[in-house]
Image (tube, rainbow, N blue to C red):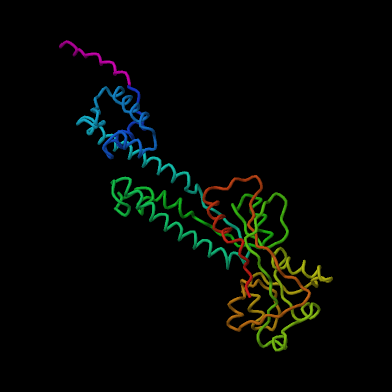
């Protein structure tokens, strides 16, 4: 029977050294890049004495002679230049980490859900989302150029490694710049209910009534127009006008209850001393109302946004109704006390960017 093999006890692990300060490594890299400690200090925005003291701390920490000092200044030694090469890899890795972490902060954790009333969903939201997409494309291109410059030490425009955050290969950054948006189309009342129930991050409404628990900001000013087919008798009138009574008794079709367009009309009629009749035919979309007007001889009250092209083509005619104020505000709403995500904030910024400019044009 052979004697059991004797095993040599493992040597204890050497005590772990304190990690080198990233700021000191940046100083070393800058000294190598700019040729002197004083030039590195200027590039980093620190004083010459602070930079010199930092270099001495780095030498003591590494127990290496990194710099030769003379009356003509301080220059890196061969050891210093070798250390700077390795330090540059650490600094660049740190830059990649910070960029990736920023992308994760900005990336939507889930789909961004917007709720918008019909007019806004059809005529304004597509513009906002197109602007957001164009901004994301431009930001991605800029990030690609900047990342390439950081990684390769070359001028902006050089190619960055595949998968680098902020480039075509870095999905995290791309997601951060172009959030995944779901747009729910409802009437204004339902939009506010969705926001209050946390089923939408932002809402966009035409209603002048704001439910409790919401905050709002005006996006634009709009107005409703009374429209008829160009063959309608009112369209052949010299001034193309009608009275409020004629409007109410002339084949008016309206939106459903809860619609911001209907609410604006109802309030305008009350201000004019009358009310919307009961049992009027109502339709659930702008397109169906326009069809009823164009082919059924009906009268409708619709946003200028929705009929501008039809008026320009002559497929609808605008009728003035003196004494009826059909102006309104289009608003963004969000739940009071809620902090918007980064992606929702970007969408809100795009939507409100032109809020000082009224929608109405004549």
266 above or below 175?
A: below
Location of the C terminus by quadrant is bottom right
124 above or below 164?
A: below
Q: Nearer the viewer, residue 84 or 173?
A: 84
Which image quarter: residue 134? Answer: bottom left
Q: Nearer the viewer, residue 328 or 355?
A: 355
Confirm whether the magenta stretch covers residue 168.
no
Which residue is at 58% across, 58% downward? 352
Which image quarter: residue 32? Answer: top left
User: Is 339 displayed left or right of 108 in the figure?
Assistant: right
Q: Position of residue 48 (x, y in %)?
A: 35, 32
Q: Total of numbered circles in the picture?
A: 0
Q: Position of residue 165 (x, y in %)?
A: 38, 48
Location of the N terminus by quadrant is top left
Q: Which residues are magenta?
A: 1-16
Which residue is at 26% across, 37% downward? 35
184 above or below 63?
A: below
Which residue is at 61% across, 83% downward? 315
Could you tell me what secondary structure mostly forms the magenta stretch? loop
Q: Position of residue 22 (x, y in %)?
A: 36, 32
User: Is 252 displayed left or right of 314 in the figure?
Assistant: right
User: Is 309 displayed left or right of 104 in the figure?
Assistant: right
Q: Residue furthest left?
A: 2
């Amino acid at each position: 029977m052979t004697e059991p093999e004797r095993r040599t006890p493992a040597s204890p692990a050497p005590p772990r050294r304190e990690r080198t300060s990233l700021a000191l490594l940046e100083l070393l890299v800058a000294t190598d890049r700019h040729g002197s400690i004083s030039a590195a200090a200027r590039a980093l925005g620190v004083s010459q004495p602070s930079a010199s003291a930092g270099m001495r701390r780095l030498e003591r920490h590494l127990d290496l002679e990194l710099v030769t000092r003379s009356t003509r200044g301080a220059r890196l030694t061969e050891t210093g230049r070798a250390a700077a090469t390795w330090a540059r890899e650490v600094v660049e890795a740190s830059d990649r980490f910070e960029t990736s972490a920023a992308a994760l902060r900005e990336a939507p954790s889930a789909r961004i859900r917007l709720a918008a009333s019909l007019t806004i969903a059809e005529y304004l939201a597509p513009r906002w989302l197109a602007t957001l997409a164009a901004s994301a494309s431009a930001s991605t291109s800029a990030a690609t150029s900047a990342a390439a410059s950081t990684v390769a030490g070359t001028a902006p425009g050089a190619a960055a490694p595949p998968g680098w955050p902020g480039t075509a290969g870095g999905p995290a950054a791309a997601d951060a710049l172009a959030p995944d948006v779901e747009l729910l189309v409802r009437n204004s009342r339902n939009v506010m209910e969705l926001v209050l129930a946390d089923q939408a991050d932002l809402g966009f409404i035409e209603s002048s009534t704001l439910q409790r628990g919401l905050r709002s900001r005006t996006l634009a000013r709009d107005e409703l127009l009374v429209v008829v087919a160009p063959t309608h008798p009112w369209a052949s009138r010299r001034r193309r006008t009608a009275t409020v009574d004629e409007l109410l008794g002339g084949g008016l079709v309206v939106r459903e209850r809860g619609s911001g367009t209907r609410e604006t009309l109802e309030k305008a009629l009350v201000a004019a001393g009358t009310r919307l009749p009961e049992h009027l035919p109502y339709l659930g979309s702008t397109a169906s109302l326009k069809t009823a007007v164009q082919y059924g001889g009906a009268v409708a009250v619709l946003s200028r946004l929705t009929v501008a092209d039809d008026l320009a083509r002559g497929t609808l005619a605008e009728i003035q109704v003196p004494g009826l104020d059909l102006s309104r505000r289009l608003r963004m709403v969000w739940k009071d006390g809620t902090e918007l995500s980064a992606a929702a904030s970007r969408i809100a910024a795009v939507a409100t960017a032109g809020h000082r400019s009224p929608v109405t044009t004549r």
